[in-house]
Amino acid sequence: MSHSDTQSLDCDLLIVGLGMTGACAALEARARGADVLILERATSGGGTSAMTEGVIYLGGGTRLQRDLGVDDDPDAMYRFMDAICNVSNKAVLRRYCDGSPEHFDWLEAQGVPFTRELYKDKHICPPQGPGLYSSGNEKVWPYREFATPAYRGHLVNGPSGNAGSKMMEVLLKRCEDEGVRVIGDARVLDLTTDAAGRVDGATFRRYGEDHTASARKGVLLATGGFQMNEKMVARDYPFLLENGVPIGEDSSDGSGIEMAQAIGADVESPGAIHATASIYPPGDLVRGIIVNKFGQRFVAEDSYHGRTAAFVFDQPDRKAYLIVDSETFDYPQFSEQFGYALVDGWETVPEMEAGLGVPDGALQRTLDNYNEFAAVGRDPRFGKHPDWLVPLKNGPYAAINLSADVVKYHYHSLGGLRVDEQARVVGANGAPVPGLYAAGSCAASVIQTAKGYGSGMMLGGGSFFGRVAARHCLAAV
Ligand SMILES: Cc1cc2nc3c(=O)[nH]c(=O)nc-3n(C[C@H](O)[C@H](O)[C@H](O)COP(=O)(O)OP(=O)(O)OC[C@H]3O[C@@H](n4cnc5c(N)ncnc54)[C@H](O)[C@@H]3O)c2cc1C
């Protein structure tokens, strides 16, 4: 990879940003013999992708799923994602599910490592070892009725909690080997258009000087999310600015979204943000119940942690408590990270109601109802899976505070530029903006609601549609 100051600023495909999306797009373009130039704001590539756990949401019968005896097919994956991901352009989802098995093969062919080991317990992301686990809401009611739940969290074999560093090390090396040209410390400011309105390049600032790069075929925005942009976060989640923790590189400030909007691009699900303060691991805590300040349940406790958080945010004053008895009690493994507080322990339910300020008798009613059905393996109200249903009858009881003003919810963005199934940016007039593509977390793609997010959907959708963009752009002109 060259960082030379003297290299040409002309190319076939100009890519803005070198995270996983930019790297995969560049490799796809180089495989077609195209001249690719990447402008990267940081000194070198990696982006937020390099900070991740390295979970990639894929399915439809990938080689890894098949090797591990996991049944899946593109239709089942589509039915599940269509039911939960809030994607309006069905062709985007269809393409992703149909192309997922090939995309896994492609990632492995690049050298991204996955072990043939299945992890079956409930975890945010298991430590290094397994290559496949359940990273979403597949088993959660009613979604388990749309399609038989399948394991789809494809986990890169790399350092525990940060396998994304290994993934990006491999992909950046591949870019270097394939002669992808990269200019670091190059912050893109604006997109340029020709007389017909076609996007044909970008201006960027490097060491205090402004330059223009020209693209013969098109420009792909792969600039990452907007969680560091307070104005964008405040749109739907102002309270996160008080007590939440944005995660990712500082460059996740929505600059790509803004520069595209400046030339007429539309956005979709612009406020969508995934926040988490997972109660699990340990999985046993999922056997507790989660109630609001009125002592009422409001979500199936076996939901993916981001879905649970989204429902907490819907509650009055965003107050919520995890209630456990002496049999189910444990400390959330990530207590320190998320700032969990044990409210207290109480011998009886009325004492707990008083301690939590819940109306008299409310929690008792909730527990009586829950226990009656849990004893026969049912949860008629929220459909919590029988695997996690046990009556909570054995005092003392304890409550862990999940309220948004107490716990430090960690968050990153999901929404962004409106794109079609070719990763073309769609304008406010409903037509593609000529010459402009977007993928990864600057685009609203395969997941547009926190209530449906599952780990890996961002890296999966970004890397997949980065490649789609490269193919379409190079074939289109
Ligand atoms: C701690 C953590 C763990 C996560 N774990 C997962 C996971 O396991 N699986 C998953 O799917 N998602 C995960 N996510 C979400 C995921 O990180 C992002 O959605 C994903 O990395 C986006 O990839 P990208 O290539 O679109 O953007 P990025 O990887 O953020 O890359 C964008 C690049 O663009 C550059 N850039 C930005 N603006 C400009 C500009 N104006 N000019 C030039 N360059 C610019 C940036 O410097 C950056 O290098 C996690 C997020 C965090 C914070």
Image (tube, rainbow, N blue to C red):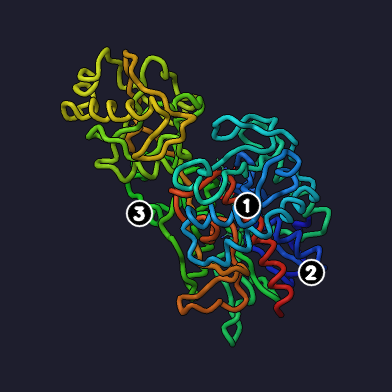
Q: Is residue 171 above or below residue 296?
A: below
Q: From the image, tell me which residue sits under label 3.
A: 236
Which is more toward the observer, 138 or 265?
A: 138
Instruction: For mark 3, give the secondary structure.
Output: loop
Which residue shows up at 60% across the image and 63% down it?
94
The tag earlier along the polypeptide, 1 or 2, is: 2
Residue 175 visible in image = yes
Instruction: For mark 2, give the secondary structure.
Output: loop
Is disc 3 surrounded by few (<14), some (14 to 19) or many (20+) residues within 10 Å?
few
Location of residue 451 in the rendering, given as x and y in whole percent from the top left corner: 43, 48
| Separation of marks 2 and 3 at Cα, in angstroms | 41 Å
Q: From the image, tell me which residue sits under label 2.
A: 34
Residue type for callout 1: Gly
State if disc 1 and disc 3 touch (CB < 8 Å).
no
Q: Is mark 1 within 8 Å of ligand 1?
A: yes
Left or right, 453 with reference to 196: left
Location of residue 393 in the rendering, given as x and y in whole percent from the top left corner: 33, 18
| Separation of marks 3 and 1 at Cα, in angstroms | 25 Å
